[in-house]
Image (cartoon, rainbow, N blue to C red):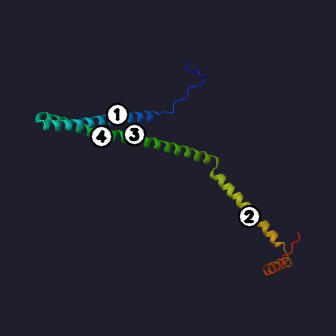
Amino acid sequence: MGNVFGRKSRPSRVTEQDKAVLQLKQQRDKLKQYQKKITLQVEKERLLAKQLLNNGKKEKALLLLKKKRFQDQLLDKTENQISNLERMVQDIEFMQIEMKVMEGLKVGNDCLKSMHEIMSIEDVERILDETQDAVDYQRQIDEMLAGSFTQEDEDAVLAELEAITQVGVNLRPVPG
């Protein structure tokens, strides 16, 4: 009865890596909240220790300063943990990018392989040979046509060329 509106449930696009990154970021945020809490507490205790010193209660002030020192060490550890978490998040995210690049390279490689299967070296050589044969055949036709002009035709073409190159000469339409 889960399909009330007739929709089929789609598979989640959230990967295990995404879940891990989210969990790491949540942990980082909790550590930052803890860090803020400890920082405020350290500041209050420092002020309280100062006040105790002013009131002549040196032993209690010393005890509070020792506690403050311990909490400062906790803050340093917390900062290191936050740095480690952030580094791990960056490593995971970069690895996801590398995986996508590798998938892209694999798809490209597969595409090239399939194209190479379609077009073999023998086919390319055959096509190039056929193309060269067609060029040679066309050259033969051109030579035949060029050779069919008589000397009189050649002289007429040269004379027309001379007439075109002279300034102020009107071109007459070529009979065709």
Q: Amino acid at mark 3?
A: Val
Labels 2 and 3 touching (C-beta < 8 A): no
Give how far apart the Cα atoms at labels 4 and 3 are: 15 Å
Query: Does residue 101 appear left or right of residue 174 in this picture?
Result: left
Point out residue 88 in the picture as x, y percentages from the top left corner: 37, 40
Residue found farthest to the right: 175
Q: Residue at x 53, y 44 (%)?
A: 104
Query: Is residue 145 shown above or below 49?
Result: below
Labels 2 and 1 touching (C-beta < 8 A): no
Name the residue carrying label 1.
30
Q: Amino acid at mark 1?
A: Lys
Name the residue carrying label 2.
136
Name the residue carrying label 3.
89
Where disc 4 sits, the SS reads: helix
Give how far apart the Cα atoms at labels 4 and 1 are: 12 Å
Which mark lies nearer to you, 4 or 3? 4
Query: Is residue 31 shown above or below 108?
Result: above
Q: Amino acid at mark 4?
A: Glu
Q: Residue at x 66, y 56 (%)?
A: 125
The tag earlier along the polypeptide, 2 or 1, is 1
The tag earlier along the polypeptide, 4 or 1, is 1
Give how far apart the Cα atoms at labels 2 and 4 are: 79 Å
Where disc 3 sits, the SS reads: helix
